[in-house]
Each structure stands twice: as C-alpha cells, then as structure tokens.
Image (spheres, rainbow, N blue to C red):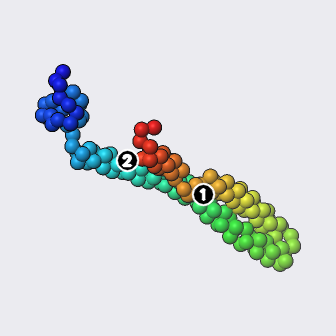
C-alpha cells in the first residue's frame, strides 16, 4: 500500500483502486439520486392511478345498483298508482293483480338498494396503499440509513 496521507491528491487510478464508486463526482451522485427519485415518483403515480381505477370501478358498480333501485322505485310508484286507480275503479281482480306486481317491484327495489348501499360502503376515495408507501418514502428520505 502507498504511504499517501489523506490530504494529498491522488490520481484517478489510485482512487478507483482502493474504493469502488469513490471516483464518481458529487454531480454524478446527485444526478443518480435525482433519477432514482424521479423513478420512485413515477411508480407512486402509477400505483395511485391503479388504485383510483379500482375504486372507481367499485363506485361505478354501486352507482349502477343505485340506478337499478331508482328505476325499481319508479316502477313501484307507477304500479302503485295503477293499483290505486284500478282498485278504486274496479275493486275486484285487476286491482289486486296490480298490487301484487307493485309488491314484487318493491322487493326488487329493496334488494338492489341494500346491495348498492353495502357496495358503496366498501369504496375508499383515498388511495390507501399509495398514501402508505408515500409515508414510507418520506420516512426513508428523512433517515436514509435506517
């Protein structure tokens, strides 16, 4: 080993021979860190997009069930109105048939509403996984050696 003091200048060959990676300048290291941070940011954005797409799909299905419940509610009102009309006009068979149809539509509406409500409760507007990884990234940025 040579007897060079820590303060004496060394040639690039001497710097690279003893410690690999020491010959990289601060600018190169900063550039590498910047590139890594940019790649990490892009990955976080992609994760957020995927998570939001998944939640939007769940919300869309729940909204469809609410739409179905709305249509069923419309049908309930329609047939209830028809049942009342036929019931008053002709107290016999036609009115009772209309009431049975109305009861069926009411059951369909209730089932769709309950299913839509339970699905909507599972929707999370916040991308949980992305928030968690961003917290981990911030923790690492504060203490990169831990």
Secondary element type, mark 1: helix
Q: Residue 137, how many percent across, how many down?
A: 44, 46
Horizontal and vertical percent for residue 118?
67, 54
Whether residue 57 can be seen here: no
Instruction: Left or right? Give the position of 28 relative to 120.
Output: left
Q: Which residue is drawn at the image coordinates 81% and 75% (left, top)? A: 84
Q: Quadrant of residue 96?
A: bottom right
Q: Residues within 10 Å of mark 1 (few under 14, many from 20)?
A: many
Q: Is residue 23 visible?
A: yes
Name the residue carrying label 1. 62
Which residue is at a point 49% across and 55% down the rendered structure image? 52
Query: Few, some or many C-alpha atoms within 10 Å of disc 2 (few <14, some 14-19, many ≥20)?
Result: some
Comparing marks 2 and 1, which lies closer to the viewer? 2
Viewer-side residue, 42 vs 5: 5
Looking at the rendered structure, which numbered label has been put on residue 79? none
Q: Secondary structure at mark 2?
A: helix
Name the side, left or right, on which 50 lies relative to 37: right
Q: CA distance from mark 2 to mark 1?
A: 33 Å
The reply to whether dot 2 and dot 1 touch (C-beta < 8 Å) is no
């Amino acid at each position: 080993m040579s007897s060079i003091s820590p303060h004496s200048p060394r040639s690039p060959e001497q710097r690279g021979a003893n410690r690999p990676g020491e010959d990289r300048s601060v600018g190169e290291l900063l550039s590498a860190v910047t590139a890594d941070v940019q790649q990490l940011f892009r990955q976080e954005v992609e994760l957020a997009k995927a998570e939001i797409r998944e939640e939007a799909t769940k919300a869309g299905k729940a909204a469809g069930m609410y739409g179905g419940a709305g249509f069923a509610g419309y049908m309930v009102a329609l047939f209830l109105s028809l049942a009342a009309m036929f019931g008053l006009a002709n107290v016999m068979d036609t009115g009772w048939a209309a009431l049975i149809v109305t009861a069926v539509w009411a059951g369909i509406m209730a089932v769709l509403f309950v299913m839509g409500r339970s699905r909507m409760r599972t929707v999370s507007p916040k991308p949980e996984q992305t928030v968690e990884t961003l917290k981990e990234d911030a923790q690492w940025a504060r203490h990169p050696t831990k």
